[in-house]
Amino acid sequence: MAIRKSQRPQEDISQSSLSDIAFLLLVFFIATTIFPTEKGIPLILPGSTSVKKQINRKNVMVITCDQSGAVFIDDQQFAVPLIEDEVRNRIKENPNLVISIETHPEARYDIMVDVLDEVKLADAERISIKMFRG
Amino acid sequence: MARFTRTVHSDSNIPTGSMADIAFLLLIFFIVTTIFRMEDGLNVILPRAEAGQKLPRQQLVNIYIDLRGDISIDDNLIRMTDIEPILVTKLQENSSTVVGLKFDEGVPYKWVHDCLDQMKRANALNTAFTVEPEKSGS
C-alpha cells in the first residue's frame, strides 16, 4: 500500500511588502527628526591681552539703560524700537562710530538684550558693553 | 539559407529580496548612532530678540543663570568664581568653544557683568547671548 504524502498547504507570509514597511519607517524617522537649533546674538569680548585703545569721544555713541528700564542715547530718552534707526543714521554720518551700551547694575537683563538687538539690527559692528557706574 | 536566430534577452532583474534587509540595516544604524544630548539646565525665560543667529551646537557651552541667582554649567550648580576654571578646561579641550549665555530675562545686569568678567579672565571671548527668536516685524 502506497503511503500518500500529506499535502500541506503553503504557509508563507508574504514578504514582498516588508521592504516597503521598512522604508516607510525610515522615511518617517528621517522626516520627523528635527535637530533643535539655538539662536543667539554673537559678541566677541575684549580679552585681557587686547590693546586698550583710546577712542575719540566724537566716535562714541553712548546708550545708557537705567534700572527702571528707560534708555538714553547721549542723555536723551529714547523708546527702544526707535534705537535702530537712530544708530543707523549715526553710523551713516560716522562709519567709525563705536556704540557703547552702558547698563545700570540693577537693570533687568532683557533691557540690555533689547538694546543690543536693536544695535545689531542696525548692522553696527563696533559694539562695547559695560556696566554703568554713575 | 540564413536562419534568423532569436536573440535571447538575459533576465536583467535586480534582486529585490534583500532590500528589506538593507532598509532595516539603515534604520537600525540610525537608531543606534543617534545620541540625544540632554541638558536640563535651569528654568530660565530667555529674552526675545530679532537679531538672533544660529549657534553651532557642537562647540556650545551653556551658562545658565536663573532669577534666584543659581548658576549652572553642564547641569552642575556652581558659584560665580568657578566659571573661570571650568571655562579654562573647556577651552583646552576645544579652542573654538562658544559660550552660550542663557540668562533669565529678569536677572540684574550686575550678574551678567560678573559672568562676562569671569569669561574674559578665562579668555573665553567667543560668546553669544542666547535668545528666544522673535519674528521680525512683529
Image: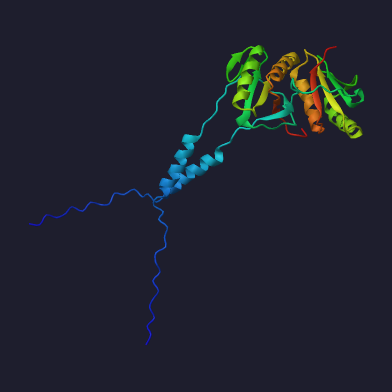
Quadrant where the N terminus of chain B sits is bottom left
**Residue A56: image x %, image y %?**
90, 24
Q: Where is residue B8, by image quadrant?
A: bottom left
Q: Tell me the residue at 38%/78% (across/down).
A: B5
Q: Nearer the viewer, residue A44 or A17?
A: A44
Q: Is residue A78 left or right of residue B101?
A: right
Q: Tell me the residue at 60%/14% (across/down).
A: B77
- Residue B42 can be seen in this image: no
Q: Is residue A9 left or right of residue A108?
A: left
**Residue B26: image x %, image y %?**
46, 43
**Residue A68: image x %, image y %?**
81, 14
Q: Is residue A5 left or right of residue B96?
A: left
- Colouring of the image: rainbow
Q: Is residue B27 left or right of residue B68?
A: left
- Residue A66 can be seen in this image: yes
Q: Where is residue B46, by image quadrant?
A: top right
Q: Nearer the viewer, residue B76 or B59?
A: B59
Quadrant where the C terminus of chain B sits is top right
